[in-house]
Image (spheres, rainbow, N blue to C red):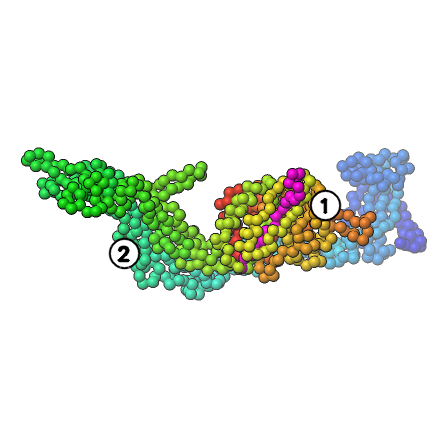
C-alpha cells in the first residue's frame, strides 16, 4: 500500500519516538491526532501486573492469541507467555491523511522497566464501512436529572470509517402516526381503542397504518330483519309483506284473527276430528273448531246397536220398557232370528204390570196378517247388508262386500294433486284394513285406511303436486338432463341390482312422460359362450341403452342378459369411455383409436380371458346432448379396474408398450368435462378409502365432479330416496 520511501520515513520517526520515551506510552500516544474511535490502550501500570497480563491473553483462557504465538515463536522460548502484552496505537495522521491507521507494540511486562519486544507495521483499521455513509436510527440511553436512564433515539452513520452520532433524543409516548414513538421496536402499538360514531351507530376508533379509522357499521342494502340496515331512519322499507312482517305471508290458523291479512278470519280451515264413535271433519269459526261430523255417542236404547259406542249393545237397559212402551216395536238383529232384521217389544212380567221385559227377536211376519215377500218367519225381514257382524241380507255371508272411502290427511287436501283417499272394508262389524308386517303377515286393524296417498312434506320435481297444496312442483321445473347408469353386473351385485330395478320402476310413475330427461344404461361384465363351461366364456361390457326416453330405457333394463360369474369389473374403462367425447381430443390422456383390450375378440369368443365390448371401443360414444346437464350413477361393490390398454408406438412393434387407464387419468378429464356430476353407490370402505391409489377409488370421481357418494344397499326404499335426491339436485330448477 505504501512505497518504500514512506515506510523508511515512518520507521525512522517511530524509532525516535520509542527511544525518546519507551517507558511512557502516554507520551507516545500524544503524537497522534485527538479524535480516536477506540478506547485508549491501557498505559503500563507496574503496580497491577495481573490486569496487564490479562490484556494479552485470549478471553476466558490462559493462552496467548494464536497469531502472536505463531509470529513470535522465538519469543515464547525466551519469555514466559504470561509476561507478554500487546497494545494498539494510532499512527501519525500526517502520514495517512484522514484515514485510520494503527500499529501494535508487544512488550515484556515482567521486566522492569518493560522491555519492547516488537513494533508492528502501521495498518489500516476501519470501525465501520466508509462506503455506506447512509444514516439510520438506533436506540440510545442517557441519564436524566432524577438519576435514572431513559431510552431515546439517535442517528448513526459511518464517516471515513468512524461511527458518528447525533444527540440522543428521549422517546415519547406512542401516538398514531406510523412512527415508533416509544422506541420499543413496534409502530403504533398499545394504543387505546376509542369510541366513534357514524350514521349507523357507535364503533371503535382504531389506528391503522398511522391513521385513525372508525370501525362503525356501514350502511347496507335494506333487508327484512326489523333493522334500519341502510341507516336512513326507516326500518324494512319496501321489504315487508301484506301483513307488514318479514318473510312469507303467515298461514291462516284457527285463532279468531286474520293471520294472512286477506280481510277474512279463519276462512276455509278444516281438520279431522273424532269421537269414541268414529272420525269426521270439523271447521273453524271465530277461533273455535265446531261441527264435527263424526258420530256422537248417544244414550243406549233397545235397538240392537251400540248407541253409546262403548263396545256393548243395549247394555244395562230393559229395552227402555215402561208401561207406555208395552207393545212398542224395536228393530233387532239377534237370535232366535237366523238372519235379516226382526223386531221385539216390551211386555209385562207380572199381573200388576209393574215389571217389564222384552220379548225375543222375531221376524216381522209374526206381527203381519199379510207378511211381505221379503220376510220369513224364521229368517226375518231381509234388508241390505250393513257392517254389524250380522247376515242382514240372508245370503249366509256376514258383512260381505262392504267398503267405504277413508282419508286420514287434512280434509282440504283430499283429491288435490297426488292426494287420494283409501278404502276400508268391513270385518266382524268394524271398518278397517289389512296391514302388512315386515315378516309378510297381514293383520286387520280397525279404522286403518289402506291405499290412501297423504301429502308429502315437499314437492318433488316430477310434474305433480306431491304436497297437495294446489301448486305443481312449487315453482320448480324439469330441465334437460342426461342420466347414464353404469352398473357392475358381477354375480355379487344380484341383490343390489334387484333393488335398483325396483326403485327405477317406482320412477316410471314420475318420469315416463318427461321428454326433457334421457336415460342410458351401461353394464358389465357379462359372460358369453358355452353355458356348460363358464370358465371358457369371454367377458364383455355392454351398452344396453344409449340415452333414450324412460320407457325405452326401462324396456332395455328389463331385457338385460342373465348375469353370470365374472373375472374383472372394468369400471374405470366404463367411466372413461362414457365421458371421453365431452372434452377436446387433444386433452385426452388416452386416445380412443389407440385403445384396445388386453385380450380382445369383438366378433366371437375364443376362450377364457377374452374381454371386448359392444359397441367396439373405437365406435363407443354416449349421445350426450350439448345443452343438457349430465349425470353418471355408478353401482358397484368392487374397486376400480381397467383392462383397456393404449399402444404408445404403433409404428414400431419392438418399442410399443401398454399403458393402463388409471384413476388419475379419469379425474383429469372429469375436471375438463362441462356440466358433469358423478354419483357412486359403493360400500362403506369405498367411501372411507376413496383416495387416489387406494383399493377403492370412486369417491374422488364424485369430489372432482361436484357429485356425492351414496351407500350401496339392497333396500329398494333407500335406493329410491337416494335416486330421487339426485334427480332433484340436477334436473330441477
In the rendered image, the quadrant that contains the N terminus is bottom right
Residue 577 - label: none
Q: Is residue 518 magenta?
A: yes
Q: Residues within 10 Å of mark 2 (few under 14, many from 20)?
A: some
Picture quadrant of residue 472:
bottom left
x and y, in percent, of residue 163 in the image: 74, 54
Residue 599 - label: 1
Residues in magenta, as a range: 516-534
Q: Residue at x 50, y 55 (%)?
A: 511
Q: CA distance from mark 2 to mark 1?
A: 81 Å
**Residue 713 or residue 711, whichever sits in front:** 713
Picture quadrant of residue 626:
bottom right
Q: Residue at x 85, y 44 (%)?
A: 105
Picture quadrant of residue 74:
top right
Mark 1 secondary-structure assignment = loop
Q: Residue at x 37, y 51 (%)?
A: 421
| Label 2 vs label 1, nearer the camera | 1
Mark 2 secondary-structure assignment = loop
Q: Residues within 10 Å of mark 1 (few under 14, many from 20)?
A: some
**Residue 14 or residue 556, whichever sits in front:** 556
Above-or-below relation of 480 to 427: below
Residue 286 - label: 2
**Residue 681 or residue 258, whichever sits in front:** 681
Tell me if I can see residue 595 in this picture. yes
Amino acid at each position: 500500500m505504501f512505497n518504500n520511501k514512506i515506510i523508511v520515513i515512518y520507521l525512522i520517526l517511530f524509532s525516535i519516538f520509542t527511544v525518546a520515551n519507551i517507558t511512557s506510552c502516554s507520551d507516545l500516544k500524544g503524537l497522534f491526532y485527538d479524535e480516536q474511535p477506540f478506547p485508549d490502550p491501557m498505559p503500563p501500570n507496574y503496580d497491577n501486573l495481573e490486569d496487564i497480563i490479562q490484556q494479552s491473553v485470549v478471553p476466558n483462557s490462559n493462552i496467548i492469541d494464536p497469531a502472536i504465538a505463531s509470529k513470535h515463536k522465538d519469543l515464547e522460548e525466551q519469555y514466559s507467555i504470561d509476561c507478554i502484552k500487546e497494545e494498539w496505537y494510532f499512527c501519525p495522521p500526517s502520514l495517512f491523511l484522514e484515514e485510520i491507521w494503527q500499529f501494535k507494540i508487544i512488550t515484556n511486562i515482567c521486566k522492569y522497566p518493560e522491555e519492547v519486544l516488537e513494533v508492528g507495521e502501521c495498518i489500516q483499521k476501519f470501525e465501520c464501512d466508509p462506503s455506506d455513509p447512509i444514516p439510520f436510527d438506533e436506540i440510545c440511553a442517557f441519564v436524566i436529572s432524577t438519576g435514572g436512564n431513559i431510552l431515546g433515539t439517535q442517528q448513526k452513520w459511518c464517516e471515513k470509517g468512524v461511527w458518528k452520532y447525533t444527540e440522543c433524543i428521549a422517546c415519547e409516548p406512542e401516538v398514531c402516526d406510523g412512527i415508533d414513538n416509544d422506541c420499543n421496536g413496534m409502530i403504533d402499538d398499545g394504543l387505546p381503542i376509542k369510541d366513534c360514531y357514524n350514521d349507523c351507530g357507535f364503533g371503535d376508533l382504531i389506528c391503522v397504518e398511522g391513521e385513525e379509522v372508525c370501525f362503525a357499521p356501514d350502511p347496507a342494502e335494506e333487508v327484512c330483519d326489523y333493522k334500519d340496515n341502510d341507516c336512513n331512519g326507516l326500518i324494512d322499507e319496501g321489504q315487508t309483506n301484506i301483513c307488514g312482517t318479514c318473510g312469507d305471508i303467515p298461514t291462516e290458523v284457527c285463532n279468531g284473527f286474520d293471520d294472512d291479512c286477506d280481510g277474512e278470519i279463519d276462512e276455509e280451515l278444516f281438520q279431522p276430528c273424532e269421537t269414541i264413535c268414529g272420525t269426521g271433519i270439523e271447521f273453524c269459526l271465530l277461533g273455535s273448531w265446531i261441527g264435527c261430523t263424526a258420530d256422537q255417542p248417544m244414550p243406549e236404547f233397545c235397538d240392537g246397536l251400540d248407541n253409546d259406542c262403548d263396545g256393548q249393545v243395549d247394555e244395562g237397559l230393559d229395552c227402555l220398557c215402561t208401561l207406555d212402551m208395552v207393545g212398542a216395536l224395536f228393530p233387532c238383529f239377534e237370535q232366535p232370528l237366523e238372519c235379516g232384521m226382526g223386531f221385539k217389544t216390551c211386555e209385562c212380567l207380572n199381573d200388576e204390570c209393574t215389571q217389564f221385559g222384552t220379548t225375543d227377536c222375531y221376524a216381522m211376519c209374526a206381527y203381519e196378517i199379510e207378511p211381505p215377500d221379503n220376510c220369513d218367519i224364521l229368517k226375518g225381514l231381509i234388508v241390505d247388508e250393513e257392517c254389524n257382524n250380522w247376515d242382514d241380507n240372508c245370503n249366509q255371508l256376514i258383512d260381505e262386500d262392504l267398503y267405504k272411502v277413508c282419508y286420514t290427511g287434512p280434509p282440504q287436501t283430499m283429491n288435490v294433486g297426488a292426494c287420494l283417499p283409501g278404502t276400508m272394508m268391513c270385518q266382524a262389524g268394524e271398518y278397517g284394513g289389512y296391514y302388512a308386517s315386515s315378516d309378510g303377515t297381514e293383520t286387520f286393524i280397525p279404522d286403518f285406511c289402506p291405499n290412501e296417498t297423504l301429502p308429502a312434506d315437499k314437492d318433488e320435481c316430477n310434474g305433480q303436486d306431491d304436497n297437495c297444496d294446489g301448486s305443481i312442483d312449487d315453482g320448480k321445473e324439469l330441465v334437460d338432463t342426461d342420466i347414464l347408469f353404469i352398473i357392475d353386473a358381477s354375480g355379487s351385485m344380484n341383490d343390489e341390482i334387484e333393488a335398483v330395478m325396483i326403485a327405477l320402476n317406482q320412477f316410471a310413475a314420475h318420469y315416463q312422460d318427461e321428454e326433457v330427461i334421457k336415460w342410458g344404461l351401461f353394464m358389465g361384465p357379462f359372460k358369453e359362450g358355452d353355458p356348460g363351461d363358464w370358465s371358457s366364456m369371454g367377458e364383455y361390457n355392454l351398452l344396453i341403452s344409449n340415452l333414450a326416453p324412460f320407457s325405452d330405457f326401462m324396456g332395455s333394463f328389463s331385457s338385460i342378459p342373465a348375469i353370470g360369474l365374472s373375472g374383472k369389473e372394468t369400471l374405470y374403462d366404463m367411466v372413461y369411455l362414457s365421458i371421453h367425447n365431452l372434452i377436446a381430443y387433444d386433452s385426452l390422456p388416452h386416445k380412443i383409436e389407440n385403445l384396445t383390450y388386453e385380450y380382445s375378440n369383438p366378433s366371437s369368443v375364443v376362450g377364457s380371458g377374452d374381454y371386448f365390448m359392444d359397441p367396439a371401443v373405437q365406435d363407443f360414444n354416449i349421445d350426450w346432448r350439448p345443452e343438457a346437464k349430465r349425470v353418471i350413477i355408478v353401482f358397484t361393490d368392487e374397486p376400480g379396474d381397467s383392462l383397456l390398454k393404449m399402444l404408445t408406438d404403433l409404428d414400431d412393434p419392438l418399442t410399443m408398450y401398454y399403458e393402463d387407464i388409471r384413476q388419475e387419468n379419469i379425474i383429469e378429464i372429469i375436471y375438463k368435462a362441462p356440466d358433469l356430476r358423478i354419483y357412486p353407490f359403493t360400500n362403506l370402505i369405498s367411501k372411507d378409502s376413496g383416495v387416489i391409489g387406494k383399493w377403492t377409488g370412486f369417491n374422488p370421481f364424485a369430489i372432482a365432479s361436484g357429485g356425492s357418494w351414496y351407500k350401496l344397499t339392497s333396500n329398494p326404499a333407500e335406493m329410491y330416496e337416494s335416486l330421487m335426491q339426485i334427480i332433484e339436485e340436477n334436473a330441477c330448477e
